[in-house]
Amino acid sequence: MTHTKSRLLLLGGTTESLALAEQLAQKPAEHPGLTVITSLAGRTVAHRLPPGEIRVGGFGGAAGLAAYLESAAIDLVVDATHPFAATISRNAALACNSAGVPRLQLLRPAWERVTGDLWHGVPDIDAAAKALPAAGQTVFLAVGRQELARFAGSPGLRLIARMIDPPDDNRADNSGANRCGSFSGFEIILARGPFGEADEEALFKSAHVDMIVSKNSGGDATYAKIAAARRLGIPVLMIDRPAPEPGDNAATVDAALAWISAQLSLATANTAASQPRNLTAR
Ligand code: NAP
């Protein structure tokens, strides 16, 4: 059978996007003719790059992404960005709809509350900032550096945040893990996960953490802090996810692989159907 050449744009920045790119690269015979281009926002210094082609940086909104889909001749898009990366997911939905490019959103399942969890659900970051405890308490903010500003100006609270790369103002001085610097009134811990449950427990105990603020990211990679909070009886302000985009979605890398295979088979079948049939010689 003749296989159509296809180009897949994989919107990345997550462990799932890396795993998907790696699985596609490991079994090229299962996806003949497929080129994979992973797109990264470029916010953090990646410590493991995906196989295949890589592009870095924003597209310039939905219109910019639609233009990229055309100029790069993209046939398929898998949006494997983080569940809280709502802007790029919205832009991907808009751009793919306008360009007529099939799109899948790969979204890992959210964490579920289990016995012993002391969760207080809040709808978004702003609601979390309003629900912080009284002065004198220590709060561990498990949110991204861009969201930290929403928690600034909370008088009398000790706010601890952890991030992979040093804040830009300290970048030259604070490279390396487990070194602290200042970031507009926050205590900063520089470290790259994954973190084990015992490590999280030790940190929360030694820092006398009274409350944790976390996004409901789902997945195993950052769950240890939730398990540690449960064991230590620390309440968690759990921020709900933004609503996913309508359209095809998958919860696992395997389901995303199946979607890609189905799309490639469809494209091959459509190409075969549009080829002129051999006429029988008279
Ligand atoms: P966002 O708010 O949804 O996106 C903001 C802008 O960043 C987008 O409009 C786009 O710029 C650019 N962008 C985002 N992801 C991109 C990608 N994969 N490739 C090219 N451009 C991208 O996203 P975010 O929450 O800042 O997250 C940025 C990246 O970090 C995402 O790729 C995400 O998967 C990853 N990440 C996010 C979180 C989180 O909690 N939000 C956690 C872990 C990893 P243009 O409009 O110019 O195209």
Image (tube, rainbow, N blue to C red):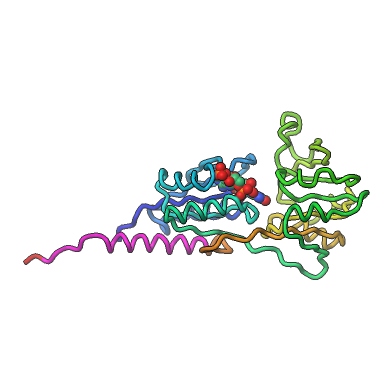
- Name the chief secondary structure element in magenta: helix
User: Which quarter of the rendered picture does the N terminus lie within?
Assistant: bottom left
Q: Position of residue 124 (x, y in %)?
A: 72, 56
Q: In this view, does 60 lie to the left or right of 167?
A: left
| Residue appearing at x 52%, y 63% in the figure | 247
Query: Residue reaching furthest bottom?
Result: 115
Residue 40 in view (yes/no): no
Q: In this view, does 280 lie to the left or right of 61?
A: left
User: Which quarter of the rendered picture does the C terminus lie within?
Assistant: bottom left
| Residue appearing at x 70%, y 63% in the figure | 111
Q: Is residue 167 left or right of residue 91?
A: right
Query: Residue reaching furthest right?
Result: 136
Q: Position of residue 211 (x, y in %)?
A: 85, 55
Quarter-wise, where is residue 123 in the image? bottom right
Instruction: Specify the segment rendered in magenta.
Output: 256-280
Residue 189 in view (yes/no): yes
* Residue 32 is one of the magenta-drawn residues: no
